[in-house]
Amino acid sequence: MNFIKRAFFSIIHSMRGTLLTMLIFLMLAVLILSSFCILTQANLYMEETRLKVYSSVKLTDDTEVHDIYYERNAISAKDIDSIAEADCVKDVKLLALSLAVTNDIIRNIETEMQIEKYGENDWIRIEGVNSVFDVGEFESEDFTLFKGEDLGSTPNGAVISDDVAMRSHLKVGDSFPLEAYYTGEGEMLGSGEDVELVVSGIFQINTEPSHTDAPYYNLENVIYVLPEVAYALNGNEAVTSAEFVIDDPLEITPFLENIQSSGYDDDAWKYLVNDTEYRNLRNTISSINRIMYLMLFATIFLGGIILLFMTMISLKSRDFEMGILLAVGENRAKIIGQLMAESLIPVLIAMAIAIFVTPPVAQRIVDFIGGMSGTQAALSGDSILMMYLCGIGLTLAASLVTVYKVMFYNPRKVLGEIE
């Protein structure tokens, strides 16, 4: 009889043992395939999410300046434009500081204690930005734009605090002049020009303001304008800082190296890298990968021991059968093939079933581990191939016991002992 037929008859005859083998390996196959599936999904999630997380390089100048707000603009806007030409830069957030003088229309907020300490101060703080939503206080929701619109919606638009708006009797759409900064004696501190602005928005402060420094540092006394307005007030195109938003966190290091090699690395310049979201993402995915590799290796190790143990038990109970086959002249290679087929067929069936069982199991593991929100566990051809390679490899490894025993089997001695 063909050894393949004998293998099928043996499987049917020992159906209980076959089903037990299938059930055990089905659980092992599901764990193995789940591990490969989640490893693949974690890497895909990393690649997709990496381009969505926020990463930037902020350029500031460390040069010591006097305590005059506008003097902190030390970086040329031309240098910023040249650096921003890099392919990896998708946006630039500028900050240009300035000061202006209050007048009959626009009035600042100061306390009696500040007046007593600093005297009456008619300066008001100006911050030139691309958008108020680039400002830290708006990002943290310490400030809220509750009337009007952001900068850029109105030519020469300005966003002012509700306190200044109330004291100055201004509302959205009203215009007001800003005078370049002068001393009380009329001496001009900068070379800028007066500008006419329009209130495009009004923000409210959601924290308790501090009034311990000079009045122009009060949170209420800041007017947000576009950088071009700050340039006009200052009489020069310079900024305090520029934050380059990078489209791929992996491009940050080459970006910094390119700046240094291009001669834009002034000794006083300081670069602050913000890739916290990417590093958190990378650490999360690394942790998931470690867990999955641990589960994978533990499953393979456990599966190897179980298959080896079951093979040894099966061979022990079939000494008489193998003795008879060898006694009638059956080829040892065919006996080995029969025994390996008996082990391999249930394993192959179990792995086929595992393909349909694994997705919901893998999804539960993903949900339990966390860290990949919105990810749907899905099988890939590579994951299925790796499962089959592991399953067949484990079966063949366990079958080495079969090969060893059959190759050194002495039918006369064994049958004599049995008799």
Image (cartoon, rainbow, N blue to C red):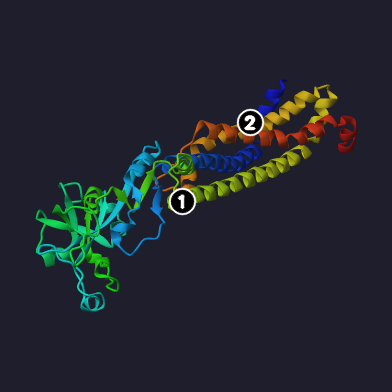
Q: Say how many tags the image has.
A: 2
* Left or right: 22 as drawn, with respect to 42: right
Q: Nearer the viewer, residue 364 or 94?
A: 94
Q: Nearer the viewer, mark 1 or mark 2?
A: 1
Q: Secondary structure at mark 1?
A: loop
Compared across the picture, whether 293 is left or right of 63 comes to right
Q: Quadrant of the N terminus?
A: top right
Q: Residues within 10 Å of mark 2 (few under 14, many from 20)?
A: some
Where residue 37 appears, x then y in whole percent?
51, 39
The quarter of the picture where the C terminus appears is: top right
Look at mark 1 in the image and give the residue it sits on.
267
Task: Please say whether residue 147 is visible from this viewpoint.
Answer: no
Q: Quadrant of residue 16?
A: top right
Across and down, in percent, residue 256 comes to 46, 44
Crowdedness near tag 1: few (<14), some (14–19) or many (≥20) residues, C-alpha within 10 Å: few
Residue at numbered disc 2: 345
Percent coordinates x, y for residue 348 in the rendering: 60, 32
